[in-house]
Image (tube, rainbow, N blue to C red):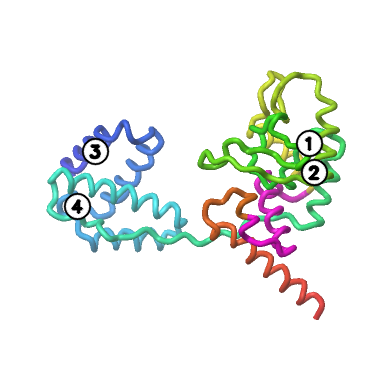
Amino acid sequence: MKKTMELIEHYFKDHKTWFSENTVKVYRISLKHFFDFVGKPYDEVKKADIRKWLEYLNKKGLSIGTKNLRLISVRLFFRYAFEEGLIDRDPSANIKTARKEKTIPRCLNRRQLIELFEVTKDSVRDRTLVEMLYATGTRISELLEIKISDIKWDGKLAWIRKGKGNKERFVLFTTECGARLREYLKTRTDASPYIFTNRRGGHLSEAWVQAIFRRYSEKLGFKVTPHMLRHSMASHLAEKDMPIAYIQELLGHKNVNTTRIYAQLSSEKRKEQYDSYQ
């Protein structure tokens, strides 16, 4: 196995500008696990050996994401060996990663949303933060980057300068949200351009906001995160039969299939309501 270990070291050395330290650590563990399992040097590994290894991982009950990560690390290594002319065939070629099951977004129901509004009412800032996350459906990273000058009061719009993929868009907010935002801004005594500011004049950090939500989750007795408000907003709009294309635009989704999950949630919600009346 000495030549295999030597090649692994050459592999990481050649990719040191491509891989982060964490990637190297994870890939190294995956390769060690693989070669310990097959008990063969890299140039004797067959496609059947990789398939047996994957069967073993399945029996171990690993998540799809973990199994895919391990397979990817092995595939990249064998592609490297093939491209370097060290093996005649790549045994990992055409072995595909497992398809991840679509996860159902976690949303707040109407009662939970009202409870969240109630528990945050003593803090003008926190209540406004919650209202804006829900009304606009923005990601927390997007909301924290919004500046006061990005608010278009007449049209009840907020400009997202750099959304996911560095794409800009406008999001809507309600009259109530606008009123709360004005009330909050009146309490501000600093000159920071950001809506939600820290003591140094910059915007609040995501870590700080996540900590705020953890405290409210403890008070409420159920978990609530900033991203759950984004899911909740989209789900509630779908329940009201807003066209999926409109919801896609508001959320800034590149692919409409990403947004369609909310239509599914809406359909399931209607079924629950129907069953409750039977």
Cα gap from disc 1 to disc 4, whole angstroms: 59 Å
Q: Is residue 41 magenta?
A: no
Are the residues at dot 2 and dot 1 in contact (C-beta closer than 8 Å)? Answer: no
Residue 76 spot, x, y in % from top left: 28, 47
- In the rendered structure, which disc, 4 or 3, sits on the residue that comes first in sequence? 3
Left or right placement of residue 2 versus residue 35 in this view:
left
Residue type at tag 3: Tyr
Residue type at tag 2: Lys
Cα gap from disc 4 to disc 3, whole angstroms: 18 Å
Left or right placement of residue 188 versus residue 106 in this view:
right
Residue type at tag 1: Asp
Residue 219's tag is: 2
Residue 271 spot, x, y in % from top left: 71, 73
Cα gap from disc 2 to disc 4, whole angstroms: 56 Å
- In the rendered structure, which disc, 1 or 4, sits on the residue that comes first in sequence? 4
Find the magenta span and give its range: 221-247
- Viewer-nearest of discs 1 and 4: 1
Q: Is residue 228 magenta?
A: yes
- In the rendered structure, which disc, 3 or 1, sits on the residue that comes first in sequence? 3
- At a point 75% along the width and 45% down the height, the residue shown is 173
The kind of secondary structure element at disc 2 is helix
- In the rendered structure, which disc, 2 or 3, sits on the residue that comes first in sequence? 3
The kind of secondary structure element at disc 3 is helix
- At a point 62% along the width and 56% down the height, the residue shown is 105
- In the rendered structure, which disc, 2 or 1, sits on the residue that comes first in sequence? 1
Q: Nearer the viewer, residue 39 or 250?
A: 250
Residue 15's tag is: none
Left or right placement of residue 11 versus residue 134 in this view:
left
- The residue that label 3 is drawn on is 11
Residue 225 spot, x, y in % from top left: 68, 45
- In the rendered structure, which disc, 2 or 4, sits on the residue that comes first in sequence? 4
